[in-house]
Amino acid sequence: MAGMASSPPPGPWRQAIRALGRNRSAMIALATLLLVTLACLLAPLYARDVARTDPFVSNVAGSVMLDGREVDIMQPNDNPLHLGLSPIGPTWRASYLLGADSQGRDLASRLLYGGRNSLLISSCAAVLCLVLAATTGIIAGFSGGIVDAVLSRMMDIMWAVPVYLFAISLSIVTVSHGLVLGPFVVRADSLFIPVFIIALVYMPYAARPIRGRVMALRGAEFVTAARCLGVPRWRIVLRDILPNVTTTLVMLGPLLMALSLLAESALSFLSLGVQAPAASWGTIIQDGEGLIYTRPMVAVAPGLAIVVVVLALNILGDGLRDALDVRDAGRRSS
Amino acid sequence: MMGALLRRLGQTVFVLFGISALVFMVFFATPGADPTARIAGRNASAQVMEKVRREYGFDRSLPVQYATMMKKLFITRDLASYVDRGELVVPEIARAAPVTASLVCGAAVIWVVASIIMGTLAAAMKDTWVDRGLMMLGLVGISMPVFWLGQVTNLVTQSRYHDTWLFSWVPGLGYVPFGESPLGWFRALVIPWIVLAVMFIGIYSRVLRADLVALSGEDFMRTARAKGLSPVRILLWHGVRMSMITFVSLFGLDFAQLVGGGALLTEVVFGLPGVGHLTYQALNNLDLPVIMACVMYSAVFVVIANAVVDVIHVFLDPRMRDAR
């Protein structure tokens, strides 16, 4: 970069945004994420005006008009080995675009509604996880000594339990009776429970790099300078440490959301996450498990949605890491 | 050297205590409901509730409850399931463990070999379409929920393409013990191995490539190039060998976590009766003693495995001996 002396150089954030803008795959990923989010937000409109069904009411006895013919939603099986009825497959028309699930509900509408919960839970979990991890990481890294030792050992212990097992254990004790935190009572089917569990389980994963960054900053000259000037500790944390940790936080955000989305789908698949009648991509995959050989679309479609979103988040995370790593960028251009 | 090992042992004991206390707290001190009701199962009679309360010491203080539980788990090993009419939990875990071990070991072989090939190839062809393609493939692998990948694989190999030459050898879902028929064991496990390995191939090949690329700027690599060694030899002999340090420590952690129950979803989808499957069945019955025992045993296993990996490191890498 041959800097023109006329204007001051752009700040680090603007530089990072520009670098990200030049990264084509990251931009495609971002556009995909926005599109999926928008589509899921429009779920009620789709269900009411396009599919014209209620995706939360069982519709086993219903029928649908296809090319002027009336077709039952539950149809006799085309495979003689399987007895009973199976739901209608993809019609590729406005109603029952992707077919129906085992209760005759429109799969495409449920997919959009499920996406709302999946995206809501994973993004909230990622944010909560970052808040928890930043608090612990900053306290541990800035205090050092015994506080750091205790907090770090606690993180080590939490991280030693296999992530999904830890999440499952927490879910199984809260799924039947909910959670009572002093005056606050969280109902068992509340979406806050999976959010809290996922955030807690991934906290050590995010806290470790934050703590490392804070440890490095603690010895930096500007922090020493502030100390010598007698600036109170809380002010140093807020004014000097926190702004320098934000790049790490921003970088971790999409990656944590990707992990949360996968964890949420696993919990929901095990009936420990989102509770019926609400849906998420994980619960729809579970609904589709019994239909996997007859109507694979029910399980395949939500899984594809998960893959697309998680992939986009991972690509975006990679792009952010490249764009924000100022030192690395400097080395490359020199 | 002795000092480093002793310090490590002390840490392990501490972490073991911490992790058992954590798991205990999750199951018995989570605010919400009475642990007695959770253990006794749904619709338990008053007598059963009273028996559970006395057996686990729920009418006494938390430390006493913790000690009682640890005794039942690791010393007397008589922890029993109330939902499943007094089935002893610990022997059940011991019966399921070989299945999980078979699954994870096979998957580990596949993911180590595949990721070393993919990572090295990508690093060797850095910034070409091969590199980009392989890394994108790895990213896709990381982004797939393993239980969904398992279902789709089942759909392809058990149903849609089962009658073609490609998948006609795939047996129905389930497990065949190695002692019964080694070939059957292999055939039953190949597909689960691959499915479980996919995510780790993605992670490890990306880590390895990044490591190799970072290493190529190091002095000893430049020296090797200046000596006139062939690029292949430099990459394999100097680069890959050096990256193995990161690789091994990552591997130890992941392997232990998988054996300790991380393979639950794979076992469920493929109907393999391992520890994860046991946990899953207990989840469906809300059979708390079984779940807790599985989690506790796996956590303990993970801690011990990590300690073993660290000790191996101390022996392998001289720098570790005086570190801290």
Image: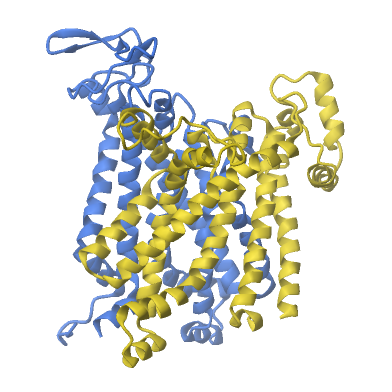
Expressed as whole percent of the image width and height from the top left, the position of residue A123 reads: 40, 47
Residue A170 at least partly seen: no
Q: In the picture, which quadrant includes the C terminus of chain A?
A: bottom left
Looking at the picture, tell me which residue is in the foreground, B209 or A180. Answer: B209
Q: Give the chain letter for yellow.
A: B
- Whether residue A211 sits left or right of residue B214 in the image: it is right
B260 vs B157, left or right, is right
The residue shown at (19%, 7%) is A70
Q: Which quarter of the figure has residue B158?
A: top left
Image location (x, y in percent) of residue B78 = 82, 37
Could you tell me if residue A205 is visible in this image?
Answer: yes
The residue located at (32%, 12%) in the rendering is: A77
- At x 53% / y 83%, what residue is drawn? A219
Name the residue located 85 percent from the left edge and 36 percent from the top edge.
Answer: B59
Please give left or right for residue A151 compared with residue B77 in the image: left
Taking the image as shown, residue A142 lies to the left or right of residue A52, namely right
Query: In what quadrant of the picture does the N terminus of chain A appear?
Result: bottom left
Q: Count the marks.
A: 0
Q: Which chain is blue?
A: A
Up the image or down, A32 lies above or below A77; here it is below
**Residue B131: x percent and y percent?**
27, 65
Give the colouring mode of the picture.
Answer: by chain
Extreme left residue here? A67
Choose between A35 and A101: the one closer to the eye.
A101
Residue B318 found in image quarter: bottom right
Front-lying residue, B142 or A238: B142
Q: Is residue B25 above or below residue B283?
A: below
Q: Residue A89 appears at what percent x and percent y?
A: 27, 20
Q: Nearer the viewer, residue B207 or A272?
A: B207
